[in-house]
C-alpha cells in the first residue's frame, strides 16, 4: 500500500500537509472548497492530479453538507453553485489543467447523463462522481505505470542503452508519486513498475529548485519504498547523462496541449534538451485528463509565477542577496519535438499524435 496523501471516507477529507514533509507527516482536515483553495494555493497539496482530486473531494464534502442542501433547491441553483465553486478552485493555480478538466467533465454530465434528473438526483450523481475521482486516479496511475515500463524498456533496449533484460537507470524531476496523485504516481508509477519487475537499476531524482519537491518529496517516497535512489541537484543532470549514469528520463505533466507541447515543473525543458543531446529517451507520463485539447500549442499555456521568497529563501532562511530582482516561474513548456512519447492511462502515443486521441475520445463518448 503506497503513501496515502489524500484520505477520504464518510464525507470527510484530509490531506498530508506537504509543507511539513519530509520531517513531519501531519494530516489536515479540508472541510470546504475555500479550505481546499487555500491548501492548493499554499501548496500543502500539489501535483496536477492531486490538486484535481482534492478540489473534487472538497466539492463533494460541501455538496453533502446540510447548509448546501437548502441553497441548491433547483437544478439552476445547483448549476450556479457548482460553477461558482469550480471557478474559485480553478483560480488557485493556473498551469495544471486538472481542476478545469474536472469542472468541464462535471458540467458535460450535468447537461447529458444527468439532465433528466431532478435536483436531488443530480446532487447525488454529482457527489458520487466527485467521490469516484480518487479511485479512478489510482487506476489510471497503475495503467500508466505498466504502459510506461513497457515503452521505456523497449526504447532503451532498441537504442542499445541497456542489454536485453538488463537494469535501467532512470532520471525524474519534481514529484509525481503518491503525494502528487491519488496513489502510486504517474512517472514515479513507471519507476515503481520497473522496480516491481526487477528492472530498475537506479532512480535519480533532481532536487527541483526552487521548491525542492525532488529533495523533500520524491526522495521521501523513494526512501519509504526502499527503491535504489540517488539525489542530485538540477545542475548535475548534464554530468549524470554524460557519465552514462542515466539511460532514460520519465517525468510528469501539468498540461499537455494538442500538438504535444507539455508544461511541467520548471527545469523540465532543460532536461529534455540534455536528453536529446545525449540520445536518451525522454518520456512524459500523465493521465488523459492532463491533456488540454482546447489549446493548440504550448505558447497558450499560462505559466504560474510564484512568490520571490520561494527562490530567495531555503527553509525560511534568506540566502539571496537583498535588492536583487527575482523571476520565479513555477513551470516551463517542453516542445513536443523533444519528447519521445507520452504515456497515458489508455496507452503510449508519440507527441505528434496527441490530437488523434481527441478524435478517438470524441468517438467513444459518442
Ligand atoms: O508545483 P507543483 O509541485 O504542483 O508541480 C508539480 C509538477 O510539476 C509535477 O511534475 C506535475 O504536476 C505532475 S504530478 C503527477
Image (cartoon, helix red, strand yellow):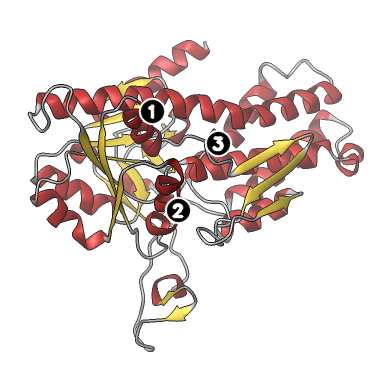
| Circles 2, 3 touching at the beta carbon (< 8 Å) | no
How far apart are the two marked residues, 2 and 1, measured between alpha carbons? 19 Å
Pick whichever of labels 3 and 1 is earlier in the sequence: 1
Residue displayed at 68% across by 26% down: 129
Which numbered disc covers residue 145?
A: 1
Give the mark nearest the N terminus, 2 or 1: 1
46 in relation to 23, above or below:
above
Q: Is residue 216 left or right of residue 40?
A: left
The residue singled out by tag 3 in the image is 182
Q: Residues within 10 Å of mark 2 (few under 14, many from 20)?
A: many
Q: Residue at x 51, y 24 (%)?
A: 139
The answer to whether the residue labelled 2 contacts the one labelled 1, judged by CB atoms less than 8 Å apart, is no
Q: Residues within 10 Å of mark 3 (few under 14, many from 20)?
A: many
Q: Earlier in the sequence, mark 2 or mark 3?
A: 3
Q: Is residue 21 left or right of residue 6?
A: left
Say which quadrant the N terminus sits in.
top right
Whether label 2 lies within 8 Å of ligand 1 gets the answer no
- Tell me: residue 37, above or below residue 148: below
x%, y% of residue 332?
32, 53
| Secondary-structure class at tag 3 | loop
Q: Residue at x 40, y 42 (%)?
A: 226
The answer to which of 92 and 359 lies nearer the viewer is 92
Residue at x 28% of width, y 50% of height: 268
Residue toward you, 358 or 132: 132
> Residue 115: x and y, percent?
73, 19
Dot 2 falls on a residue whose secondary structure is helix
Please give the label number shown on residue 217. Answer: 2
Amino acid at each position: 500500500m503506497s503513501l496515502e496523501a489524500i484520505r477520504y471516507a464518510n464525507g470527510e477529507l484530509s490531506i498530508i500537509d506537504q509543507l511539513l514533509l519530509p520531517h513531519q507527516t501531519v494530516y489536515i482536515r479540508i472541510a470546504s472548497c475555500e479550505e481546499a483553495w487555500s491548501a492548493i494555493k499554499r501548496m500543502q497539496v500539489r501535483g496536477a492530479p492531486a490538486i484535481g482530486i482534492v478540489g473534487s473531494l472538497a466539492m463533494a464534502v460541501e455538496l453533502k453538507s446540510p447548509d448546501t442542501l437548502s441553497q441548491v433547491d433547483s437544478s439552476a441553483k445547483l448549476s450556479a453553485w457548482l460553477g461558482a465553486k469550480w471557478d474559485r478552485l480553478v483560480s488557485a493555480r493556473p498551469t495544471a489543467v486538472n481542476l478545469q478538466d474536472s469542472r468541464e467533465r462535471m458540467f458535460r454530465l450535468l447537461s447529458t447523463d444527468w439532465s433528466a434528473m431532478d435536483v436531488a438526483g443530480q446532487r447525488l450523481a454529482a457527489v458520487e462522481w466527485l467521490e469516484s475521482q480518487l479511485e479512478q486516479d489510482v487506476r489510471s496511475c497503475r495503467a500508466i505505470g505498466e504502459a510506461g515500463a513497457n515503452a521505456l524498456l523497449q526504447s532503451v533496449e532498441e537504442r542499445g542503452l541497456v542489454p536485453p533484460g538488463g537494469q535501467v537507470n532512470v532520471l525524474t524531476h519534481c514529484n509525481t508519486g503518491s503525494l502528487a496523485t491519488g496513489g502510486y504516481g504517474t512517472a514515479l508509477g513507471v519507476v515503481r513498475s520497473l522496480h516491481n519487475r526487477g528492472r530498475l537499476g537506479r532512480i535519480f531524482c533532481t532536487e527541483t529548485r526552487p521548491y525542492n519537491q525532488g529533495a523533500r518529496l520524491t526522495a521521501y517516497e523513494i526512501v519509504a519504498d526502499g527503491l535504489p535512489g540517488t539525489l542530485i541537484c538540477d545542475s548535475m543532470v548534464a554530468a549524470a547523462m554524460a557519465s552514462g549514469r542515466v539511460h532514460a528520463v520519465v517525468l510528469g505533466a501539468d498540461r499537455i496541449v494538442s500538438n504535444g507541447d507539455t508544461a511541467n515543473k520548471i527545469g523540465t525543458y532543460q532536461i529534455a534538451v540534455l536528453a536529446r543531446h545525449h540520445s536518451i529517451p525522454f518520456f512524459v507520463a500523465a493521465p488523459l485528463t492532463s491533456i488540454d485539447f482546447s489549446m493548440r500549442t504550448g505558447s497558450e499555456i499560462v505559466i504560474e509565477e510564484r512568490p520571490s521568497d520561494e527562490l530567495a529563501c531555503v527553509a525560511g532562511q534568506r540566502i539571496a542577496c537583498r535588492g536583487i530582482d527575482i523571476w520565479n516561474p513555477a513551470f516551463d513548456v517542453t516542445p513536443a519535438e523533444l519528447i519521445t512519447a507520452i504515456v497515458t492511462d489508455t496507452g503510449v502515443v508519440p507527441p505528434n499524435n496527441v490530437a488523434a486521441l481527441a478524435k478517438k475520445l470524441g468517438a467513444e463518448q459518442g
